[in-house]
Image (tube, rainbow, N blue to C red):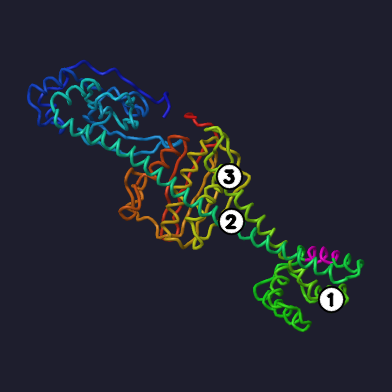
């Protein structure tokens, strides 16, 4: 709502409502005559023509208002949109500085939403100071209860929110350690096996050299080893059935030529993609049956060392990727606010949650890689992605399809995180962003994940987050502006 549409009139002089008139308002109907007289003397009435803005969201909350007549509309800004939260013509409804009775704790008190008069409306007005004094002096016990409730809820929310962050961090750390342990253990096993194979290669080479092999034939055998390794590197991957058939063929060939341990060597040659033609080439190069056994074993060791080194390279590469993803996720050594590619945070979050997602959930990424960068606090957005993806996985009970889609919608980037779970009932959709509200069983959720996500997206980035849900298709839609948010 723009300033051009705002109509503000100076309230009239005090004393415009009598005690009997004040008593017709449900807020004041039980007060004494002396109390009503005080209110009348300290209050005033205000007329607002149709279309006028009575109070504006974000302005200092300095007035407490009661509707006397007319129709009003309450709105709240979500991103670039004004969302209507209520429309009423009920006489006596109140708005404005409703928390003025709380003791001053240094937190600025502003209007939480805007109020506009839809037709000519009249209000009874008290200043925030007068309303606060009246409540504290006349109803001390009630104020103590209300303060305890309000401040207690605020402190509880802060404590539980902090605890939730620590719990989430612990879960992510445990998952990351699990993911790191797998490739680290694989690299350790491969290194131990590699040491044995290299020792075996040295032994077989010594045996070949001691067998009075012609130098030219030994050089040819070394060259053959290089040819075999190169052929193995270029070999087409085999299916499980093709590998089994190849092992049988190679085993039979070695058995016919009395190669010791042929059935143990066959899987090594099959995994390397080698066939009968390659073994025949080795036999021709060796030239004598006596050296064939040692040559086959020597080349087998060479193949195993290559395969083990590949395993080590893959494992250490996996460790490096996980560390890189963790660094990207935590935004270590990066500015708190920056222009980012939204996909990098989504990918790093998926890596961090790999252990929690599990094998039963299929992840589908439908990214629009042409999207421009957005101004954001990436570490905070990663917390949003974590909450939404974690909720989606839990909703599917570990089995289903997780779909993450990005696209552009006008001047916003939209991130859709969907799952194939049972969905959210219609009567609960409007409550999912409320603090402490959760559909999870007791002990499995704090009810703050979506509240935190909402505040990060809406308050921190000037965006919007919505829920579309039906059985088998639940999607959280996060809209982020392409322009610099005012809070940045």
Question: Reading the chain from its start, which is encountered first: label 2 or label 3?
Answer: 2
Label ID, residue 183: 2
User: In percent of the image, x 69 and y 58: which residue is there?
Assistant: 309
Residue 159: x percent and y percent?
33, 39
Density class for disc 1 (Cα within 10 Å; few <14, some 14-19, many ≥20) is some
Front residue of 41/430: it is: 430
Label ID, residue 344: 3
Density class for disc 2 (Cα within 10 Å; few <14, some 14-19, many ≥20) is many
Residue 358: x percent and y percent?
49, 59
Above or below, 219 relative to 442: below
Residue 343: name its quadrant.
Answer: top right
Density class for disc 3 (Cα within 10 Å; few <14, some 14-19, many ≥20) is some
Magenta-drawn stretch contains 226? yes
Magenta-drawn stretch contains 484? no
What separation in Å lies between label 3 and label 1 (alpha carbons)? 53 Å
Name, please, the residue furthest toward the top: 13
What separation in Å lies between label 2 and label 3 (alpha carbons)? 23 Å
Q: Which residue is mark 1?
A: 283
Q: Secondary structure at mark 3?
A: helix
Evaluate if marks 2 and 3 touch, with contact meaning CB atoms under 8 Å apart.
Answer: no
Q: Secondary structure at mark 1?
A: helix
Residue 451: x percent and y percent?
38, 42
- Residues in magenta, as a range: 222-231
Front residue of 17/104: it is: 104
């Amino acid at each position: 709502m723009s300033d051009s549409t705002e109509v503000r009139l100076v309230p009239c002089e005090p004393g415009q409502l009598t005690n009997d008139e004040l008593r017709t308002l449900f807020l004041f109907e039980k007060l004494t005559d002396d109390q009503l007289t005080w209110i009348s003397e300290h209050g005033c009435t205000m007329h607002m023509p149709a279309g006028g803005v009575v109070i504006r969201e974000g302005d200092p909350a300095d007035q407490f208002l009661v509707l006397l007549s007319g129709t009003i509309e309450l709105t709240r800004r979500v991103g670039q949109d004004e969302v209507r939260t209520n429309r009423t013509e009920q006489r006596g409804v109140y708005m404005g500085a409703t928390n003025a009775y709380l003791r001053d704790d240094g937190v600025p008190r502003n209007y939480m939403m805007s109020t506009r008069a839809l037709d000519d409306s009249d209000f009874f007005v008290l200043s925030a100071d007068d309303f606060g004094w009246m409540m504290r002096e006349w109803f001390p016990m009630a104020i103590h209860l209300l303060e305890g409730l309000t401040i207690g809820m605020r402190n509880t929310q802060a404590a539980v929110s902090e605890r939730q962050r620590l719990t989430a961090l612990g879960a992510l750390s445990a998952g990351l350690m699990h993911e790191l342990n797998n490739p680290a253990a694989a690299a350790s096993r491969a290194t131990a096996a590699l040491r044995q194979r290299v020792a075996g290669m040295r032994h077989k080479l010594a045996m070949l050299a001691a067998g009075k092999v012609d130098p030219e034939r030994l050089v040819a055998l070394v060259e053959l080893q290089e040819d075999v390794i190169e052929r193995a590197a270029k070999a087409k991957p085999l299916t499980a059935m093709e590998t089994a058939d190849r092992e049988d063929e190679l085993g039979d060939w070695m058995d016919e030529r009395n190669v010791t341990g042929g059935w143990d060597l066959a899987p090594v040659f099959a995994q390397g993609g080698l066939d009968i033609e390659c073994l025949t080439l080795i036999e021709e190069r060796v030239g004598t049956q006596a050296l064939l056994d040692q040559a086959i074993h020597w080349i087998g060791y060479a193949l195993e060392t290559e395969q083990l080194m590949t395993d080590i390279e893959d494992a250490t590469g996996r460790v490096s990727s996980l560390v890189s993803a963790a660094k990207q996720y935590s935004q270590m050594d990066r500015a708190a606010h920056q222009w980012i590619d939204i996909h990098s945070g989504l990918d790093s979050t998926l890596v961090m949650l790999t252990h929690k997602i599990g094998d039963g959930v299929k992840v589908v990424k439908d990214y629009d890689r042409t999207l421009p960068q957005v101004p954001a606090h990436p570490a905070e957005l990663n917390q949003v992605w974590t909450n939404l993806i974690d909720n989606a996985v839990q909703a599917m009970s570990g089995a289903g399809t997780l779909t993450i889609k990005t696209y552009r919608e006008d001047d916003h980037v939209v991130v859709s995180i969907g799952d194939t779970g049972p969905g959210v009932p219609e009567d609960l959709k409007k409550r999912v962003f409320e603090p402490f509200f959760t559909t999870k069983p007791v002990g499995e959720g704090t009810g703050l994940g979506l509240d935190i996500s909402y505040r990060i997206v809406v308050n921190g980035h000037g965006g919007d987050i919505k829920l579309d849900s039906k059985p088998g298709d639940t999607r959280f839609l996060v809209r982020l502006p392409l322009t610099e948010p005012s809070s940045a």
